[in-house]
Image (cartoon, rainbow, N blue to C red):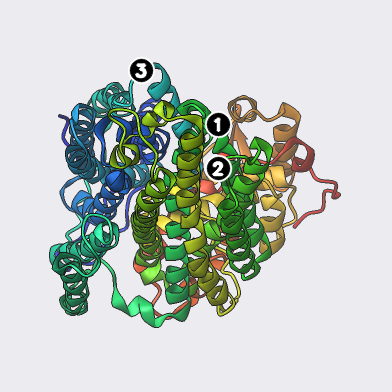
Amino acid sequence: MAQDTPGPGTTASDASGAPATPAIPGEGLPKGGVRVAIGALLLGMLLAALDQTIVSTALPTIVSDLGGLEHLSWVVTAYMLASTAATPLWGKLGDQYGRKKLFQTAIVIFLVGSALCGLARNMPELIGFRALQGLGGGGLMVLSMAIVGDIVPPRDRGRYQGLFGAVFGGTSVLGPLLGGLFVDHLSWRWVFYINLPIGVVALAVIAAVLHIPASRVPHRIDYLGTFLIAVVAVCLVLMTSLGGTTYPWSSWRIIGLGVLGVLLLLPFVLVEHRAAEPVLPLGLFRIRTFTLCSVIGFVVGFAMFGSMTYLPTFLQVVHGVTPTLSGVHMLPMVAGLLIASTGSGQIVSRTGRYKVFPIAGTAVMTVGLLLLHQLDPTVSTAMMSVYFFVFGFGLGLVMQVLVLIVQNSVGYADLGVATSGATFFRSIGASFGVSIFGTIFTNKLGPRIADALAGVPLPPGVTTDALKSDPRLLHRLPPAQRTGVLAAYSQSITDVFLYAVPPALLAFALAWLLKEEPLRGSVTAPDTSEVVASNPVERSSRDEVARALSLLGSREGRAKVYEKIAQRAGVDLIPAACWMLLRIKRDGHAEPAILAERVDLPLRVVTEGARQLEIRGLVRREGLQLLLTDEGQQVADVLFRAREEMLAELLGDWWTAADRPHDLKCLVEQLNKELCGSDAEQPRDGEAAGDRPDHRR
């Protein structure tokens, strides 16, 4: 295993503890090596993202094979709870001990959990192994995103993190389909075995090519707070999933779980008040917007993951479709979610208006839940697709915007923890949703099957309990009884959507209480990984700002940025000349013919810029190379400062605050150096030469 070595990207500290200016991540690394490393990180992310969706279409078959329909929800919940609890620990341990080693450890834990899941002989074993898999999955997700920041300069970070978002979007579509294909043509166990070859490849590539600059950021990790919040969540989820199914609601076990969960909240609050780096800073709840968004996010997670867990069961049992086709039927929901989340995030980023989206999203989501409640054995595929799309569209309208609103409501110091906190509550909501949906389904199903089969002689080996545990026994029933049992399954599953309507209406009411504040220029739509992930996003404040500024920098590069720089600086130069001047300032010299070939610009564009610089006396020739004159150096410095001011203005009050953080100033300086005269901001052919006459400055 290659060791992490000191190098660029390190946020070192001197003896006084003051952070030193970080070097540029990726400096000195070969471009091909970075791409191969990113590919391996994407494989790691693919593993974790795929396991959130690939299991859903396989669940009915798993339950039929292993039994224990009442425990179906825990196959999903165990993974979610473990990954949610582990996420903050992976992030801080990676900072403290080196991310490469931790990432490899996460892959190994995930692969061991996957292999054991494939070998599980009963539901308790599968649930336990899924929890182990979730521990590794949380590390894969948080560390892969963090490592991008170690090896990729800020100017490219938005582009590369967009690839990770694309992996999430792709697995949302492919996961249910792949799960169905494996079940139909191999075995449900291949849903887990498929992780092994992918993980081994990722592990080998990471060991061979990933050389992360060493980063030793000391943390006082809140182990006790993490343990307490995990135990509270487990107690309450166990109470809601076992109550009324395995044990009566009035039993001492269920009451004890509820009381224990509530009582442990007190020591959790005390621990968080005293922790140097709390896992969930309680001060965030003094921010009204954060509190409202957390509750709304909880409800969104509750509805989304609860429904996505039980809809494949409805499709496969009630409509009799294959696992593969059940994945196809789910595509309209995923399409609606991705279209709405991407569109709403982009609209908010450009217009600065966001309050309408949580209101509209929770309203459409409520309508979608009511439509899903109308599903029955006779509903057509076309109508189901419409219902699924409406529900997914409602979720998408609110999910991405919630993260954006939270980021806009907090100070720079709290940006990272507020982002992870908002997604944390959606993750906890998802765990509760899957659990409570399962409890409602199980409580309703047993009595309805018993009513449907009351007084009817059953074939040998077929009992009410057997039909609850193994839906495949339905084909052994006479047609009349089969219809009654299918109706029992249908009503029991669709009832869960009706029970989700009151929480959705609560979220709708709370959305009206959100206060719309001016949107900071640096607050952009989060990537897809922050939207559809089942476990919290974990990035520092600096990482979030670097991602946003890199996206905005590239967006401005497409919008005639050098015209804006020249105008701000009071310099009458065409865009191509401004770009070349800053390029020469950065590299020390430039040769027009080679430069045109390297950056894929027409030679005439580069020549026109060079000619204007020579006429103005801003550059001089030495052979084929252009060098800055003293006056050229002064003009380049003015342009450079103008570009930096443009970046800084995007930060709003984060930048103008009297106690502006040192690392924020370093980030803006670093990003400005990378963008000025860069390939990413090269002028376009049509706008490079400009139409203005050649006047001197």
Q: Quadrant of the C terminus?
A: bottom right
Q: Residue at x 44, y 33 (%)?
A: 175
Quote the CA–CA distance across marks 3 and 2.
25 Å
Q: Quadrant of residue 277?
A: bottom left
Is tag 1's residue or tag 2's residue first in the polypeptide sequence?
Answer: 1
Assign a secondary structure to mark 3: loop
* Marking on residue 328: 1
Q: Quadrant of the N terminus?
A: top left
Residue placed under numbered mark 2 in the picture: 334
Vertical relation: 122 (above or below) 222: above
Q: Is residue 104 above or below residue 277?
A: above
Q: Position of residue 469 (x, y in %)?
A: 30, 39
Residue 538 appears in the rendering: no
The residue to which callout 3 is attached is: 186
Residue closer to the observer: 79 or 317: 317
Residue at point 35%, 33% (across, down): 458
Q: Is residue 36 left or right of residue 324?
A: left
CA separation in Å, label 1 and label 2: 10 Å
Q: Nearer the viewer, residue 89 or 328?
A: 328
Q: Which mark is residue 129?
A: none
- Residue 456 location, x and y as percent? 39, 39
Tell me the crowding category of disc 2: few under 14, some 14 to 19, or many 20 or more residues within 10 angstroms, Cα based.
many
Residue at left offset 58%, top offset 62%: 366
